[in-house]
Amino acid sequence: MKWLWEQVVNYEDPEERKLSEMFMKLPSKRELPDYYQLIKKPVDLKKIKQGISQHRYRNLNGISDDFYLMFANAREYNVEGSQIFNDSVNLLSVFTKIYDTLTKGADGPQDPEMGDHDAGNSAAPMMML
């Protein structure tokens, strides 16, 4: 699951801009109090990473719920066509492609953290999208 999180966080657009930066930490309640009035279940990448570290997710379905919620929150709060709205759409697509590859791969469900990659290579391969 950490590998999946890292793939989303490290994804860059063709201009080499990391799309995940605006999703790393929730906005300040002081700066955007209306965000917390509109968004009932705020979640960010930091919280998802914490959940991975604390073994809160039992499987890939659990982590996917938080990714989908995070991107849905961004689309609900932000104006369609804004950078963060568009980044949420693009990162959702990135996440979905990786998630589908892991869960519906040709050889059945796979999890890179469970030894599906070359044991001699300590780094998981980067997914090209």
Image (cartoon, rainbow, N blue to C red):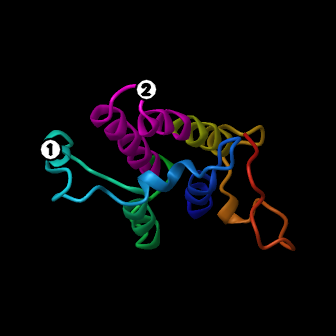
Disc 2 secondary structure class: loop
**Residue 128 percent coordinates (x, y):** 76, 44
Q: Is residue 35 left or right of residue 2?
A: left
Quick one: label 2 or label 1, which is nearer the N terminus?
1
Q: Position of residue 89 (x, y in %)?
A: 49, 33
Q: Please name the residue shown 77% across and 37% down the image.
A: 106
Say which residue appears at 65% left-offset and 48% top-offset. Answer: 12
> What type is the residue that disc 2 sits on?
Gly
- Relative to 107, residue 58 above or below: below
> What amino acid type is highlighted by mark number 1?
Asp
Q: Range of the magenta residues?
A: 62-91
Residue 15 figure quarter: top right
Residue under the point 84% across and 71% down: 121
Q: Quadrant of the N terminus?
A: bottom right
> Is 4 drawn above or below residue 109 in the view shown?
below
Marker count (numbered): 2
**Image coords of residue 14 (percent x, y):** 71, 41
User: Where 81 sits versus 27, above or below?
Assistant: above
* Residue at disc 1, secondary structure: helix
- The residue under label 2 is 81
Residue 34 image label: 1
Q: 127 or 14: nearer the eye?
A: 14
Q: Predominant secondary structure in magenta? A: helix
Residue 53 got which mark? none
How busy is the neighbourhood of tag 2: few (under 14 within 10 Å), some, or many (20 plus)? few
Q: From this viewpoint, which residue is outermost toward the top?
A: 80
Magenta run includes residue 87: yes
> Of residues 120 and 81, which is closer to you in this image?
81
